[in-house]
Amino acid sequence: MKKYKLLSLLFCSVLLFGCAADNVDLEKMSAEELYNQAHNYLAETRYKKAAETFEKVELEYPYSKWATEAKIMGAYAYYKNENYDDAIMALDRFIRFHPGNPNVAYAYYLKAICYYDQISDVNREQGETRQALEAFNQLVARFPNSKYAADARQKMVLARDNLAGKEMEVGRYYLERKNYLSALNRFSVVVTNYSQTGYIEEALYRQVEIYTLLGLPTEAKTAYDVLKYNYPKGNWTAKAAKIVKDKK
């Protein structure tokens, strides 16, 4: 049987070995045969079965060259089956035991994608978003010139935007309830940590608004000056100008 190597790892291109039959006897297969059979299951989109078969390669032939490749392919199969926790655990094992493997950059990338694909809208908790951002950061820090780095950086922008959106949502909630200090803290997080997101203009405006409500004109003017300098013709700047002018 022809020996197949692990292919491209942007999305782990699946090798097509023909249709796998349900009556295949996995117990009589060699490491290579099991590995190829697992690829058959991937080709048929039988992801759970593929993951189990890749794991079987690891368990029964742990010292074979196929076992190393089976680790990351099993993780990919779990990912395709949306078993994200299992995929992440498998990828962590791969990274821990094979730090010098040519596919370790992809392992970091796929781990980040497992978190990224679970990101919810800003109205819900953002635990997966933070984990995705951390994982993408690890990838970019360790493998800045890898083929996955550019996509990771783009997704990091979206992840930060999501986190900023959540802070803004909570900040508005506190503001509506006149809990000004709690609201200010949230908006200040956006100004400090997410200044490259689309929420920065409103966050600066909210600082102007809340400092004014708290009777802190100096702080309000400072926030306004930052807003005006960066967005001189922005709508939020125009609104902030009215607040600062009204209080002069």
Image (cartoon, helix red, strand yellow):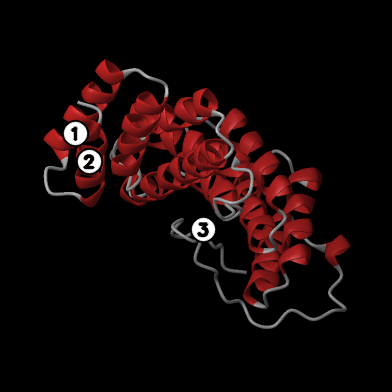
Are circles 1 and 2 on residues that touch, CB within 8 Å? yes
Among the 4 quarters of the image, the one containing residue 217: top left
Mark 3 or mark 1, which has the lower sequence index? 3
Of the two numbered discs 2 and 3 in the rendering, the one whose residue sits closer to the viewer: 2
Q: Is residue 207 left or right of residue 134?
A: left
Q: Is residue 170 above or below residue 57?
A: above
Q: Residue at x 34, y 50 (%)?
A: 154
N-term-proximal mark, 2 vs 3: 3
**Residue under label 2:** 242
Number of labels in the image equals 3
Q: Quadrant of the C terminus?
A: top left
Question: Which quadrant: the N terminus?
Answer: bottom right
Instruction: State the residue position of label 3.
Output: 5
Q: CA distance from mark 3 to mark 1?
A: 69 Å
Label 2's element? helix
- Mark 3 element type: loop
Mark 3 vs 1: CB contact within 8 A:
no
Please tell me whether mark 1 sits on a helix, a strand or a loop. Answer: helix
Distance from disc 2 to disc 3, alpha carbons, whole Å, reads: 66 Å
Q: Is residue 101 visible?
A: no
Q: Whole-percent x and y of residue 213?
A: 40, 27
Residue sitting at x 43%, y 59%: 8
Label of residue 245 in the image = 1
Name the residue type under label 3. Answer: Lys
| Rendered residue at 55%/71% (across/down) | 15
- 85 or 169: which is nearer to us? 169
